[in-house]
Image (tube, grey):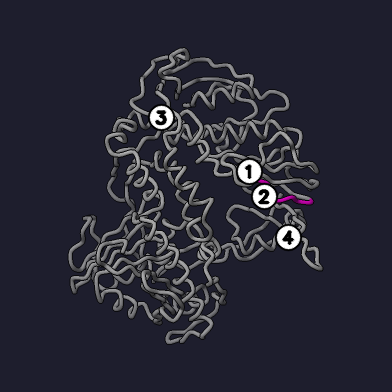
Amino acid sequence: MASGKRPILMGDFETTTGKNLEIEGCTRVWLWSLCDVERAETVFDVELGFTLDSFMARIQEQSVVLYFHNLKFDGPFIIDWLFRHGYWHTTEQHPVKGSFSTLISFQGQFYSITIKFDNGCTVEIRDSLKKLPMSAANVAEAFKLPETKGKIEHNVYRPIGYRPTLAEREYAAKDVIIVAKALRQQFASGMKKLTIGSDALTEYKGIIGKRMWDKMFPVLPDATDAEIRMAYRGGFTYADPRFSRKRTGGGVVFDVNSLYPYIMYVKDLPYGEPKYFPVAPDTNDENYPLHIMNITFVAKLKKNHIPCIQVKGSSHFINTEYQRHIKEPVTLMVTNVDLALWQEHYNLEILSYNGGWSFRSRRQLFKEYIDKWMEVKANSKGGLRTIAKLMLNSLYGKFATNPNITPKIPVFEDNMVKLVMGEEDTRDPVYTPMGVFITAYARDLTIRAAQQHYDIFAYADTDSLHLVTDKEPDTLDIDPDKLGAWKREYRFTEALYIRAKQYVEKVEWRGVPFVLDVYETHIAGLPVDVAAKVTIDDVINGAHFDGKLHPERVPGGIVFKDVGFTLTV
C-alpha cells in the first residue's frame, strides 16, 4: 500500500454541461465511478453511482486515500457539497470532525482535499495528474494497457434521475481503471509522494544521503535565493521569421533524447555555498567557475544570428519575444552560460556589472540516479518505461521549486465555491542555482544547434529542431537511443510556422494500399482532438473551430463552456 493501512481508491465524475446549466441553473454529478487501486483489474471491479450524495456516502464508510485525475475540476464539486452540508474549511493541517482542509497553490493548482467526516473517518483526496502528468488516454497508451479511453457525448441534456447507458457506464469505468493501474505500478516502484517531482527528489536524496545533501545543497537565505531566481528561465521556443507565417517546403524534425537528464549527466553544475562578488565575477577563479551576475547592457543582433535574449517584466518589451535590438539599457540577472551565448549572437555592450554570485562546480552529481533510470528505460516497455521517463524528467525542476506557498482558500459565496488568497506563507528553497544552470545549458544546446543550421532552421521548442531541408544534416549527432543525441521524429512535406507554440506540419503516412496526409498540429490552448482536424489551409483561411473549452465556476462545481477558436496567421 502507498499510504499505510488506508485503502487507496480511484474516482471520477461525469458532470452535466451547459445545456443542463441553462435549464437548472447549476451543474451536478450524473455518474460517478470508483475502484480500489490495489485490486481493480477490469471494468467489472468498478463501482458506479448516479448522484454526488451517494458518492459522498460511499467514501466516508472508512478512512481512505482517494485519487481524481485532475482534481482542479472534480474538487470543486466535492467542496460545494461539503459547504452545502454544513462542513467548514480549516487552515489546520489535520481537520477536526465536520471540517476539511485543502492544499491549493496561489496559482489555483489543486493538490489535495482532506475531509474529517462527522463519523470520524478521514478521507484524503489527491490529484493523480500530479503523479501522471498526461491525459487518461495518454496514460493508457504510455502504459500499454488493454483498456483505451472511449468517447461519449458530453454536451447533451441529462435530467435529474437520468440513468446512464451501458456505453456511458463502460466509459466511466475505463477512466478509473486506466489511471488506477498506472498508479499501482508507480506505488510498486516506491513512488509514494504527492507529486512525481517529489518522488524524484526523495529518491535522489536517498541515493546521496542526508549528510551529502546538506553539504552539496545548503538552504540559501531568502534574499540570495530571490536574486538567483531572477536568472531562472524556461526553454527556448522560437519561430524564425524567415520561414514563419507562410507555407514552407518539406523538412525534418529532430528531438534531443532526454535533454535535461543529459545536461545533468555531462555538464559542470553548481553546488555548495555561493561566494558573493560586488561588481564583476572573477573569471580566473578556478575554484568558483560558475557565475550568476547582474548586468546592465545594450545589444544588437549580429547578421545571420538567432535572437536569444528575452526581457520580461518590462513595459518596453513583450515578454515572449526574443529581442533583436536593445537600444536603451536594461538590467538582467544572467548565468555565465547565457552570457557567453549572448556575446556570440549580439554586439553586446555591458555598461556595468552590478554584483552576483559564484559557485563551485562538479560533474556527474546525478550519475547514479540517471544511470538507474536510463537502464530501466532501455530495458523496459509500457508502464516501467513510462515511469523511468517521468523520473528522469521530473528531478531538475524540483531544485527551483517556488518557495512561495501562499495558498488559495475555498469560500462559499453567491451560491458557489470561489477561491480567495490565503495568508502569505513561504518555505525554504531547495537549491535554485541548480535549476538555473540546468535550464541555461539546455537552452544553450538547442540554440547552438539551431544556429549551426541557420540557413534551414525554421522552428524550435525546448528540445526540438524543425529544419526545412530535403537532406538529413550530417552535423548533428543522430541516434534514436543515445543520451543527448538527436532523434529523428518525422519528415514533413510542407509546413506553416505561425509563432511560438503554434505550427502545422503535413506528414505523409504510407500504408497499404493508401497514402494519407496526416497533420502534426500544435497550437497552444487548442485541445488535441480539435488540433487533429486542423490543416495548413485552415490556418491560412482563418477557419473557426468549436471545441476550445473554458472552465467556469457555477453553483455545484465547474462547467466547461465552448468559446471556440479562430485561427490566425
Q: Which tag, 3 or 2, sits closer to the chain's start? A: 3
SS class, disc 2: strand
Distance from the alpha carbon under mark 4 to that under mark 1 = 19 Å
Q: Magenta span has 403? A: no
SS class, disc 1: strand
The residue singled out by tag 4 in the image is 518
User: Residue at coordinates 37% horizontally, 60% vertically from top-left?
Assistant: 187
The residue singled out by tag 3 in the image is 228
The percent coordinates of residue 381 (x first, y second) are 53, 59
Up the image or down, 298 lies above or below 214; here it is above
User: Residue at coordinates 54% horizontally, 21% vertically from top-left?
Assistant: 329
The percent coordinates of residue 262 (x first, y second) are 53, 38
Q: Which tag, 1 or 2, sits closer to the chain's start? A: 1
Of circles 2 and 4, which is in front? 2
Of circles 3 and 4, which is in front? 4
SS class, disc 4: strand
CB atoms of marks 2 and 4 within 8 Å? no
The residue singled out by tag 2 in the image is 489
Distance from the alpha carbon under mark 3 to that under mark 4 = 44 Å
CB atoms of marks 1 and 2 within 8 Å? yes
- On residue 464, the disc is 1
Q: Is residue 264 left or right of residue 64?
A: right
The percent coordinates of residue 222 (x first, y second) are 31, 32
Q: Which tag, 4 or 1, sits closer to the chain's start? A: 1
Q: Which tag, 1 or 3, sits closer to the chain's start? A: 3
Please report the bounds of the magenta region as a residue range.
486-493
Q: Which tag, 3 or 4, sits closer to the chain's start? A: 3
